[in-house]
Image (cartoon, rainbow, N blue to C red):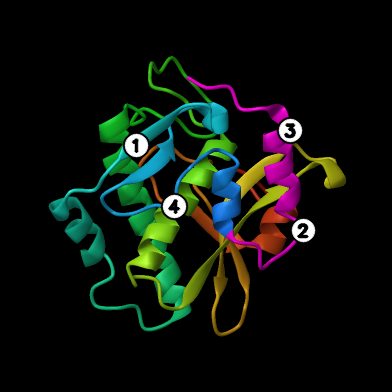
Amino acid sequence: MRLLPLASILCAALLAGCSTTRDPQLYLSHFELKQPEIGDFETCASAGCRKLSRLAYSESEWQSLHTIFEPAPKNAAEERERLLVAVAAMEAIIGAKNGTAGDNPKNQRLGSQSPQLDCIAEAANTTVALLLLQKEGLIRHHRVGYPQHRGFARLRLPHNTAAVFENESSKHFAIDSWFFANGVKPVCVSVAEWKAGYSPYATN
């Protein structure tokens, strides 16, 4: 297990708010995550991304993910729904490979012996998943954005998430897999709503 300097974590968080055109691979590079390929990619296997897993999708696994996008989504809203299904499926496959299948919602260990991922790791892993889907041409109505950060400035607990831009409108969406357990569909809301403190557990 390697220790990630706190400065690197803070830098990744601060850069999230600096530019909407920043390359998402820059976020991954803070944790020494390589550019992903279907047959060779890395994911965070611990909180803070202090431990990495180097993995590969088998032909049958990738075909099952490809099937999620068949037929191709007709519009951006439909594609976002498919992305949530795909990210959940990718989490389940990865969890079975690297022992993170027992990852619980948020930071709740609840007695689980599985490594518990935090939002830093979840944002990185979801970004890896989205970049793979984009690279293979399965994302057509969006582009993967730099992960987003909230907290500090708005006096909220710090939190990170993966994000995408809608191509036609440039609308910015958070895809947050941290709120739920491994293999459960993440949430997708506008980045503005997410930065305002969105939580699926909030009650009116």
Real-space CA distance between mark 3 and mark 2, rounded to the nearest whole angstrom:
16 Å
Considering only order in the chain, which callout, 2 or 3, is on the residue closer to the N terminus?
Answer: 3
- Vertical placement of residue 134 versus 2, above or below: below
Q: Check disc 3 and give the amino acid type.
A: Ala
Real-space CA distance between mark 1 and mark 2, rounded to the nearest whole angstrom:
30 Å
Specify whether residue 82 is in view.
no
Residue furthest to the left in view is 60
- Vertical placement of residue 64 versus 8, above or below: below
Real-space CA distance between mark 4 and mark 2, rounded to the nearest whole angstrom:
22 Å
- Residue range highlighted in magenta: 1-23
Give the residue at x 32% y 67%: 136
- Vertical placement of residue 129 versus 179, above or below: below
Real-space CA distance between mark 3 and mark 1, rounded to the nearest whole angstrom:
24 Å
Give the residue at x 61% y 27%: 4
* Number of the label disc, if any, that sits on residue 35: 4
Q: Check disc 4 and give the amino acid type.
A: Gln
The image position of residue 37, as x and y in percent, is 33, 54
| CB within 8 Å, label 4 to label 3 | no
Q: Is residue 167 left or right of residue 140?
A: right
Real-space CA distance between mark 4 and mark 3, rounded to the nearest whole angstrom:
22 Å
Q: Which residue is mark 3?
A: 7
Q: Is residue 123 left or right of residue 202?
A: left
Q: Mark 1 or mark 2: which is in front?
A: 1
Q: Is residue 167 left or right of residue 103?
A: right
Considering only order in the chain, which callout, 1 or 3, is on the residue closer to the N terminus?
Answer: 3
Q: Which residue is mark 2?
A: 18
Considering only order in the chain, which callout, 2 or 4, is on the residue closer to the N terminus?
Answer: 2
Q: Is residue 11 left or right of residue 182?
A: right
* Dot 4 crowding, Cα within 10 Å, few <14, some 14–19, many 20+: some
Residue 201 picture quarter:
top right
